[in-house]
């Protein structure tokens, strides 16, 4: 029985329910989002002006340059953060999920671009898979036809998505160091003799403490951090208003775009290079989209428009007003602009706000890695759901400690916020540009927009982002190489893992065991049938897997009831519990062989920790009891023989809403474990169990064994050196060190049988 909140997340809500949910949760979620989503973008004032004036521009600073930088900050913040993300991108969620992979998932469903194996027609009946609605346009039809005609374009799109994903992970590595270092370095204004090593040491201690808090979960961290961000935003906006009236009320004139043209005219190439610092004002906008699954689109929009946007604009204007009268303080402008009586309180709040700013990208990185795992683009890692109310809030221990080590390395290695800022800007702008391109495809294929609207969107926002990317690329030798190296490493890992996984599936498909071959082994399948139920885990949704043939060749016996279990991902965020299992029959009824396809969305927790054995047996019994009724009702029945010549039928039906079965005549033969299966059916219709159902229940009493294959990939001898290195070294290392299938599936060791195989790619 799902909780109401889970039903809302999985099945969607009606308009009436949406209003009720909004009234009760939007304000709470908006408040929480301040501590998780907006911590990054709200701490940008700590280092934006410092980084923008870090080059030759610092030698020619005057009021016109300061006005120009402020004008760029204002219009960049307004156009990209407000217009693009709040008004457009956040509307492209995938049933409440955001991020690069959410856009990719939408495209895969609507244009059939999915690279996931084992996709079935029954998957398209899921609620979240629905692609009906708007009528196709000639543009959308032409684009879909282009992808169908040129399958290689699918790989190009995947690599492009992985680029944006890896840059987003790089953002998660760079945000904590620059935020914390910029905040802590303010203490040097009051303690002038403080050595830089102490600033780095304090920053490292703070970072270790931050990552140590992650296991408590985003839900608890949000309530702890939200008051800090709220206080921070109110502080910097109040100080901004004070500085505007105190130093230069005419700074309001800088909001005119005319000052951007004057800025370029007077500074030339130096002004263009300084844009690499200006773009840091919108760092964190991508996390608004990536963290969408933690909250809701409405709550994030409310928090940004009501509090975050006006407070940050006032803060930037106030700092510019101060700088217009104190040019010499450009490299320490933020803390210098703070009135003396409130310096220490603001410094303390700034330090805590920097910690919170790091939380946004850490949460976003967890979401990204989780989606990558589900879509076969990252090795299996432990994913812990930390909130029973908000399903998207997760914690990944391995990724958490990996991020911590990388953040400490960047902090200790670079020590300078300007160099980190150069790397940071390139990572952020690249992710934004990837999002813009994917949004263009979504607008054509999913939203069915006219081509002129899409071109206008791409040209307008894409040109702005390419301008900033070009400025950041110029800074590659000065720290911009860091996100490039990190992205290359992560992309290599993701692509190699995806390539190896797909080759493994291709091997399994090519080496399926024919049912005729098994039958030819002799009477009763030529094997000894031992009591119990055997669960054979396979990567296939059709046919008999090669590991089964390998198993029976070496051990000529298998269980009385055999179930081929395939755990697969579907290109949707969530699959509801009552749609989780697909039951089918393999071969003739006398064989006692079934297939169970366990389906998960890319945001679901793939771990069978809810009494999977009992639920599976209950569903199989239901399938057996209703099999003839399904035939009489002319429900859709497909046979595997139509898909695989020579094999006996593999009848596949969509699982009906779950109910349990009761047998008063044979109940004395059913153990306590089996009664658990029947515990909730006292008020349902009484059925007389068929003999096959009774045998299945008796087999359950004898025990359940898990048969899992361990396949080892090897590159073929004629393969290139690059392929041999990728498969024999990298993929083998990742396979050895990722979470084992039995751990992911929560298989008891006492019931585990492992079958090893080697396959060549």
Image (cartoon, rainbow, N blue to C red):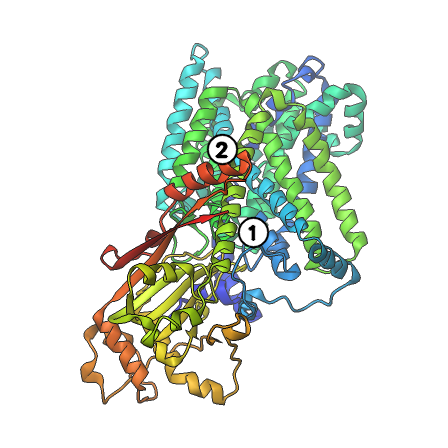
Rendered location of residue 610, percent (x, y): 32, 63
Q: Quadrant of residue 680?
A: bottom left
Q: According to the image, label 1 marks what residue?
A: 98
Residue at point 63%, 48% (across, down): 155
* Viewer-side residue, 169 vs 687: 687
Secondary structure category for the residue under label 2: helix
Residue at point 68%, 45% (across, down): 436
Nearest to N terminus: mark 1 or mark 2: 1
Rendered location of residue 732, percent (x, y): 42, 41
Dot 2, how many residues are within 10 Å of its Cα: few (below 14), some (14-19), or many (20+)? many
- The answer to whether any part of residue 679 appears in the image is no
- The answer to whether any part of residue 192 appears in the image is yes
Circle number at residue 700: none
Is 242 situated left or right of 561 in this image?
right
Above or below: residue 229 compared with residue 442: above
In whole angstroms, how far apart are the C-alphas of marks 1 and 2? 20 Å
Dot 1, how many residues are within 10 Å of its Cα: few (below 14), some (14-19), or many (20+)? many
Q: According to the image, label 2 marks what residue?
A: 173
Is 367 situated left or right of 693 in this image?
right
Residue at point 26%, 72% (across, down): 700
**In the rendered image, which quarter contains the N terminus?**
bottom left
């Amino acid at each position: 029985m799902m909780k109401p909140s889970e039903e809302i997340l999985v099945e969607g809500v009606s308009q009436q329910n949406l209003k009720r949910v909004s009234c009760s949760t939007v304000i709470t979620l908006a408040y929480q989002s301040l501590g998780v989503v907006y911590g990054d973008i709200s701490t940008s004032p700590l280092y934006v002006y410092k980084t923008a004036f870090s080059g030759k521009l610092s030698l020619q600073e005057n009021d016109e340059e300061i006005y120009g930088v402020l004008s760029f900050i204002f219009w960049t913040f307004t156009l990209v953060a407000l217009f693009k993300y709040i008004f457009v991108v956040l509307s492209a969620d995938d049933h409440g999920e955001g991020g690069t992979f959410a856009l990719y998932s939408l495209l895969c469903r609507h244009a059939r671009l999915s690279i996931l194996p084992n996709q079935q027609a029954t998957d398209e009946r899921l609620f979240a898979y629905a692609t009906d609605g708007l009528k196709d346009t000639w543009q959308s039809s032409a684009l879909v036809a282009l992808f169908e005609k040129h399958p290689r374009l699918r790989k190009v799109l995947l690599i492009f998505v992985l680029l944006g994903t890896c840059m987003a992970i790089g953002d998660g590595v760079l945000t904590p160091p620059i935020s914390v270092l910029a905040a802590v370095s303010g203490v040097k204004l009051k303690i002038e003799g403080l050595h830089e090593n102490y600033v780095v040491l304090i920053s490292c201690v703070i970072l270790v403490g931050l990552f140590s808090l992650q296991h408590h979960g985003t839900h608890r961290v949000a309530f702890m951090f939200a008051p800090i961000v709220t206080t921070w935003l109110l502080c910097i906006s109040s100080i901004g208003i004070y500085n505007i009236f105190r130093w230069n009320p005419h700074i309001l004139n800088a909001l005119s775009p005319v000052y951007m043209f004057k800025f370029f005219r007077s500074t030339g190439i130096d002004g263009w290079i300084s844009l690499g610092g200006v773009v840091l004002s919108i760092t964190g906008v991508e996390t608004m989209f990536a963290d969408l699954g933690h909250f809701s689109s409405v709550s994030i929009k409310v928090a940004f428009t009501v509090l975050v946007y006006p407070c940050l604009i006032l803060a930037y204007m106030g700092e510019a007003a101060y700088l217009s009268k104190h040019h010499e303080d450009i490299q320490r402008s933020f803390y210098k602009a703070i009135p003396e009586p409130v310096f220490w309180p603001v410094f303390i709040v700034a330090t805590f706000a920097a910690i919170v700013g790091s939380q946004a990208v850490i949460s976003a990185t967890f979401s990204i890695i989780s989606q990558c795992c589900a879509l076969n683009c990252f090795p299996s890692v432990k994913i812990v759901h930390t909130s029973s109310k908000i399903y998207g809030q997760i914690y990944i221990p391995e990724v958490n400690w990996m991020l911590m080590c990388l953040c400490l390395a960047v902090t200790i290695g670079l020590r300078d916020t300007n160099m980190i800022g150069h790397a940071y800007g390139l990572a952020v702008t690249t992710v934004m540009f990837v999002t813009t391109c994917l949004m263009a495809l979504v607008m054509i294929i999913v939203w069915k927009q006219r081509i002129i609207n899409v071109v206008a969107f791409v040209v307008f926002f894409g040109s702005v982002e390419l301008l900033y990317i070009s400025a950041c690329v110029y800074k590659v030798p000065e720290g911009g190489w860091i996100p490039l190296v990190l992205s290359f490493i992560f992309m290599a890992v993701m692509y190699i893992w995806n390539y190896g996984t797909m080759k493994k599936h291709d091997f399994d498909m090519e080496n399926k065991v024919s049912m005729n071959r098994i039958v030819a082994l002799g009477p009763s399948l030529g094997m000894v049938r031992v009591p119990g139920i055997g669960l054979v885990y396979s990567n296939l949704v059709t046919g008999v897997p090669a590991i089964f043939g390998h198993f029976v060749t070496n051990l000529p016996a298998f269980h009385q009831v055999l179930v081929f279990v395939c755990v697969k991902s579907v290109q949707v965020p969530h699959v509801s519990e009552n749609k989780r299992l697909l039951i089918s029959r393999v071969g003739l009824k006398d064989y006692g062989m079934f297939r169970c396809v366990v389906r998960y969305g890319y945001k679901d927790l793939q771990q069978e920790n809810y009494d999977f054995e009992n639920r599976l047996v209950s569903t199989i019994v239901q399938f057996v009891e209703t099999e003839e009724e399904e035939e009489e009702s002319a429900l859709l029945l497909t046979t595997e023989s139509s898909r695989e010549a020579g094999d006996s039928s593999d009848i596949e039906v969509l699982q009906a809403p779950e109910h349990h079965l009761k047998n008063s005549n044979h109940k004395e033969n059913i153990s306590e474990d089996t009664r658990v299966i029947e515990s909730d059916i006292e008020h349902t219709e009484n059925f007389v169990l068929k003999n096959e159902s009774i045998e299945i229940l008796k087999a359950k009493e004898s025990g359940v064994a898990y048969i899992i294959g361990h396949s080892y990939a090897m590159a073929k001898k004629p393969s290139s050196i690059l392929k041999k290195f990728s498969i024999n070294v990298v993929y083998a290392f990742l396979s050895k060190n990722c979470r084992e299938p039995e751990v992911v599936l929560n298989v008891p060791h006492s019931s585990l049988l492992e079958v090893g195989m080697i396959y060549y790619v």
